[in-house]
Image: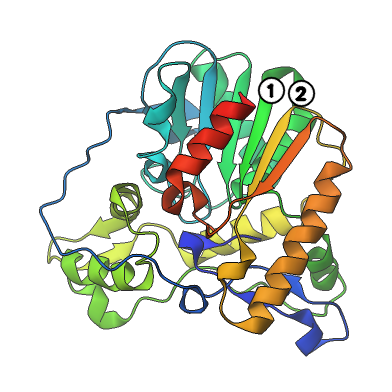
Amino acid sequence: MRGLFGYTFVFCLQALTSLPCCHWQIPASMVRSTHSPTPERAWVDRSPHKSGFVEVNGIRLHYLDWDGQGKTLLFLAGLGHNGHIFDDLAPRFTARFHVVAMTRRGFGLSDKPDSGYDIETRVSDILGFLDALHIGRVILIGHSIAGDELTAFAAMHPDRVESLIYLDAAYDHSELAKALREGYIKELPISHPSIPEESLVSVDAYLGNLRKTFSREWSNAFEASIRDGMEIHRDGTVTRRTSDDIYRAIQNGSVLAPLDYTSVKPPTLSLYEDPSIVFDATARNATTREIARNIALITKSGPQIVTDEIQGAGHYLFIDHLEQVVKEMNTFF
């Protein structure tokens, strides 16, 4: 499973039990960085979108709309992020499509109820969102954990799906689910980076800490997503908007969902990160095996599935290799 902010690690069940290693993600410290932290500056949201809310299933969901004409592209963010993570990618398609991004419940400016983080409710939220905006069929594009929502939505509502694009997002969790159900592990570790107390004293300290951790991924879009996910208090201190309980509920909802990646029916493009950029040998080998396993699974669905590994790309391949991802998507369309 792909985790928060691309904060990654290899969760090796073999070390705890006799089960094979299950790949989650690779720690950012294990990935070769290609970008240096940018200096602090007066920040402006430069992406040309409108911002709005719709009420779905008794809650408000936040969304961004870049306008455009034609079929609708709906972008869904990975765990811990919101629609702003696509601020640089989404505008590249408005000449051919109507482009929107929805922030799932629990994150960003969307409501954060105590429940509803199972895959069925998350799919229902997407359906309600489309209905609220009078969108019929849609091209779904998801990063990281959103891949589970793409797979489930396409299975439950095939008449509403034109095609699917997985951005390092088509990962099967069956081995991890088995370990949970059989008690080999008690619970999943929360997949977000820890923030030291001294980094919560101000916006600058908070952003500075994350900018150092995610120097490879840092961009206007990444910063916009971080800013939408933080709460600034009257005394200037900062906290995350989303509780650990919500992270845990989302992770459990995905891992325990009965998703079948061998029967993905719509035309599909599934892009993956490049495991060779991971310099830790154990993590690199685990990532290589996991990507190969998941490509083998999804391609069993049929010839409508197109897969590719983006050379040199990390988990946020649509940020660190934006131009190549745009090219792959345009070719697929």
Q: Residue at x 32, y 68 (%)?
A: 210
Mark 1 crowd level (few <14, some 14–19, many ≥20, 10 Å Cα): some
> In the image, which disc is placed on residue 158?
2
Q: Secondary structure at mark 1?
A: strand
Task: Give the percent coordinates (x, y) of residue 255.
Answer: 73, 58
Indicate the quadrant containing the N terminus: top left, top right, bottom left or bottom right: bottom right
Which amino acid, mark 2? Pro
Q: Residue at x 25, y 69 (%)?
A: 206
Q: Which residue is mark 1?
A: 161
Q: How many marks?
A: 2
User: Which is more toward the observer, 70 or 271?
Assistant: 271
Which amino acid, mark 1? Val
Task: Judge whether 248 appears above or below 52 on screen.
Answer: below
Q: Where on the picture, by quarter, is residue 163?
A: top right
User: Which is more toward the observer, 231 or 192?
Assistant: 192
Q: Secondary structure at mark 2?
A: helix
Indicate the quadrant containing the C terminus: top left, top right, bottom left or bottom right: top right
Query: Disc 2 vs disc 1: Cβ atoms closer than 8 Å?
Result: yes
